[in-house]
Amino acid sequence: MQVPANFTQLLTEWRSGQPQALDRLTPLIYDELRRLARGYMRAERGSHTLQATAVVHEAFLRLIQANVDLQDRGHFFALASRLMRRVLVDHAKSRSRLKRNAGFRDLSVSDSEQKAGSGEVSVIALDDALESLLQLEPRLARVIELHYFGGMTYDEIAAAVGASAATVHRDIRLGKAWLLSEIGGAAK
């Protein structure tokens, strides 16, 4: 992530109530958030109705409205990635409710959200698996989220979770294996 050094200073100014800091901060982060959102959207089905820009805007709006003490750029992007994940999950659940209300039978994850043999996994199935992992191994879940949803490097994740890059690498491998097992091996 190539974010200028004054990022943390702008976050501090914004937190202290200087609205012009947000105006200067937004262009510094917008391209990175769009890159992350495009990465998420590549993993979605081709007929997905949500665009990367909409994911960024909704996540950014939620971030601005949240009363969170953002510490630095790592914390910011970790929170932003979590919010983008929530936007995608909320969208998927909303579409699922619409289908049920339109008279479709209530399908299970294995019926509708995973395409057997296709290697595609729904955002809902992944979110459920990550929530399960969070209950069992919170650090593994956080490392997976920061890497895959946050687009952070091993070194950035290591700094965020207080571990070494080697530990992060092991955590990612272990977390990915656990998620694949939990989802049923349908992911790539």
Image (cartoon, rainbow, N blue to C red):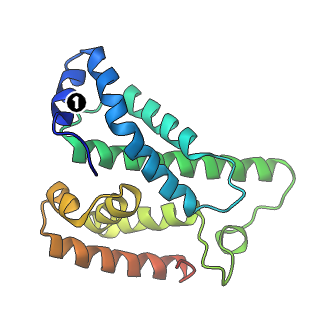
**Residue drawn where x is 41% and y is 57% of the image:** 149
Position of residue 30 relative to residue 127, above or below, is above
Q: Is residue 8 visible?
A: yes
Left or right, 58 with respect to 2, comes to right
Residue 39, percent across and down?
48, 58
Residue 46, percent across and down?
69, 61
Which quarter of the figure has residue 80? top left
Task: State the SS at label 1.
Answer: helix
Position of residue 69 relative to residue 139, above or below, is above
**Residue drawn where x is 60% and y is 65% of the image:** 122
Left or right, 146 with respect to 149, comes to left
Position of residue 170 relative to residue 121, above or below, is below
Q: Determine which residue is flagged by label 1.
A: 11
Q: Nearer the viewer, residue 80 or 114?
A: 80
Position of residue 163 relative to residue 53, above or below, is below
Mark 1 crowd level (few <14, some 14–19, many ≥20, 10 Å Cα): many
Which quarter of the figure has residue 167? bottom left
Residue 96, percent across and down?
71, 53
- Tell me which amino acid carries mark 1: Leu
**Residue drawn where x is 24% and y is 15% of the image:** 18
Left or right, 36 with respect to 19, comes to right
Going by the picture, which residue comes out furthest to the right? 103
Q: Nearer the viewer, residue 86 or 23?
A: 23
Q: Nearer the viewer, residue 35 or 131?
A: 35
Residue 11, percent across and down?
22, 30
Q: Is residue 85 visible?
A: no
**Residue drawn where x is 56% and y is 61% of the image:** 42
Left or right, 115 with respect to 41, comes to right
